[in-house]
Image (cartoon, grey):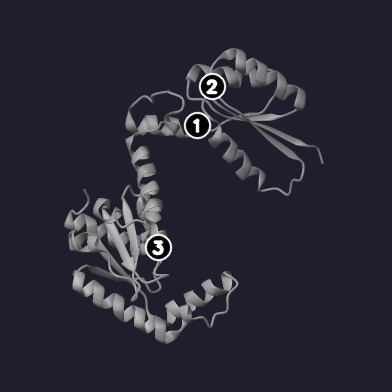
Amino acid sequence: MVKINIYAVSDSLGETAEQVAKAVIRQFDLADFDIKKVSYINDKESIDNLIQKASKENAFIVFTLVVEELRDYMIEKASEHKIDAIDIMTPILVPLVKQLGLAPKNEPGLLRQLDEKYFKRVESVEFAVKYDDGKDTRGILLADVVLIGVSRTSKTPLSMYLAHKNLKVANIPLVPEVSLPEELKLISPKKIIGLTLNVENLNKIRKERLKAMGLRDTANYANMERIFEELEYSEKVMKNLKCKIIDTTNKAVEETASIILDYIAENEIKK
């Protein structure tokens, strides 16, 4: 079987063209193929050079060029050299222009522009990492939301998921032998979300966690009496704080996060 050569071409990074090419290639059992990403093609000379290379390698081209003049030139030159060139964007642009009655901006790299939301998301993720698992209780006073609960109630994955929704989240483990951070008493109860889980599920999850760590699942961490003790303690703490309590049993992270986001919206507790 002949080697398949593909050029993924763009006036920006070229990630979209590359991913489309990879997705198509996966539909075949091909062992010998090469996808070359070509970024920042923004003039006719660059297209001429690309066409020459593609012609020598018997390659075809997958491209995303938003400037109409360059798109047309690519198609024209590819046709002259009998090279297959697939325009990914135009089939989607044309019906949108028709329905919206608007002309596209035709500006390369808009997908990659770093806007305010992007920077806030990065900041929120960094916050979640810094104030994960009670590392620094000062984060409680700075957070939009504080998650509390015993070990393995999905505090960390929820913190990261909510961070990608631009929320600053701190999470605090509840352990009977460890004093509750004073900062929890200084913020609005509406900013605190208590997470719980039924005994059987928590026991199962903790046993799996111990096995993953190479430890025996008979450790106190997964002991039923210990789990009862921790859950009773956490329930008492949550009731004293008068915070919202969510039972995460059989709930995906996305489902629990949706409940939290709805609660936030209802109570307007986000800064």
Viewer-proximal residue among 245 and 76: 245
Helix, strand or loop at mark 2: helix
- Location of residue 79 in the rendering, given as x and y in whole percent from the top left corner: 65, 21
Decide which of tag 1 and tag 3 comes sooner along the chain. Answer: 1
Q: Is residue 268 above or below residue 102?
A: below
Find disc 1 in the rendering and name its residue. Answer: 89
Helix, strand or loop at mark 3: helix
Q: Is residue 156 above or below residue 31?
A: below
Mark 1 vs mark 3, foreground winner is 3
Q: Quadrant of the N terminus?
A: top right
Find disc 3 in the rendering and name its residue. Answer: 253
Classify residue 173 by image quadrant. bottom left
Dot 1 amino acid type: Met
Helix, strand or loop at mark 1: loop
Find disc 2 in the rendering and name its residue. Answer: 71
- In this view, the residue farthest toward the top is 45
Classify residue 255 by image quadrant. bottom left
CB under 8 Å between discs 1 and 2: yes
Left or right of 157, for residue 188: left
CB under 8 Å between discs 1 and 3: no
Viewer-proximal residue among 38 and 195: 195
Dot 3 amino acid type: Val
Decide which of tag 1 and tag 2 comes sooner along the chain. Answer: 2
Please report the residue visible at 22 percent of the width from the left and 51 percent of the height from the top.
Answer: 270
- Location of residue 199 in the rendering, given as x and y in whole percent from the top left corner: 39, 82
Viewer-proximal residue among 114 and 124: 124
